[in-house]
Image: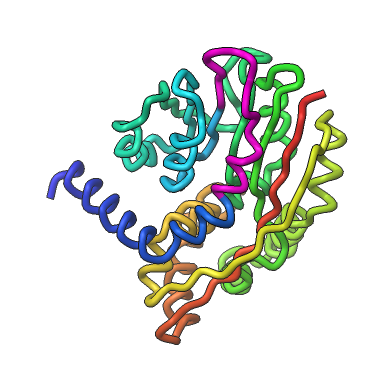
Amino acid sequence: MSTSNQTAERIARQNRIDETCVDTLWTNHVDGPLCALLPKDFGIRAPQILLPELRFKSLLRTLMNTLPEKTRLMIIDDNSTRFDGLRECAQSATQSMYFSTQRIEMLNYADNSFHAILSELSLAAVCRAERVFTSFYRVLKPNGCLMCASPSAGTFPAFFDIFEECLVTIAPQKCQELMQIIQTALDDDSISELFTSLGYDIESSQKLQFTLEFQTTEQLLFSTLVETHYLGFCLSLGYPDIDGRKLLTQLVRSFHHYFQDSQITVPIRRTLYHLAKK
């Protein structure tokens, strides 16, 4: 099978899983409230909005129904293959869409470029939060706004149990250090303090809580939520002495051992922030 056919098959499978297990609840509890924070009027005909790590197609669809037609959407990710599924949605968009492969903590845009940034942050992003939010701050225009949904303590606890068990086996000398980094990254008070120290005004914050259900471990593993936000974390650790792929392989195997029930429940805890650049 050719690479393009494999990619198409993977996207189709992930679409089916997301539509069945994720999209409706995610749209109601995360996408909708996040998009509702966008200003109704930016005061110009063609506002520029940055969408880092836009991986949920449900968010893109919600945005397309929310934003003015002249809006310019800049979608970035460090993995260009993730753009393939999003381009399906872009075909019917009235807004201008641009895709760029770059790391979110090393944005190549000029200072003061964007009227708004909107992001559903992955675990990898919040674990390098200071660099990420400093990068966002630089490219935001004065008084520009950042709307983000960040994973919070208590979200998907099974993942962190499995991750720690695998990390003890793969890299016992780094386990305690990494688990502390994750704990800090998921702590709302720590994130709020970071925002303030970087120069953001916290306009509002709210807790988001709901539960996703999956019928099989395969559904869970191949959903956008787990594949990109949690499993992808293993490949973004930034520790040269930890083999991320080896850790990911063991993690996936452990998922199959951990989840034995026919129905898998995943508690989701996120905090929604509306920030303004001073």
Q: Residue furthest bottom?
A: 261
Q: Is residue 180 magenta?
A: no
The boundaries of the magenta stretch are 31-49
At 64% from the left edge and 15% from the top edge, which residue is drawn? 43
* Residue 234 in view (yes/no): no
Q: Position of residue 91 (x, y in %)?
A: 29, 31
Residue at (49, 68) in percent of width and height: 251
Q: Position of residue 268 (x, y in %)?
A: 60, 64
Q: Relative to residue 195, is residue 86 drawn left or right? A: left
Q: How is the image coloured?
A: rainbow
Query: Horizontal and vertical percent for residue 255?
Result: 47, 74
Quarter the C terminus occupies: top right
Q: Position of residue 124 (x, y in %)?
A: 60, 48
Considering every residue shown, the one lying at the far left of the view is 1
**Residue 60 falls in image quadrant:** top left
Q: Is residue 59 above or below residue 208?
A: above
- Horizontal side of 234 relative to 173 (left or right) equals left
Foreground pick, 164 / 133: 133
Q: Foreground: 269 or 180?
A: 269
Left or right of residue 179, residue 200 in this image: right
**Residue plotted at (50% across, 81% down):** 258
Residue 133 in view, yes or no: yes
Q: Is residue 28 left or right of residue 208?
A: left
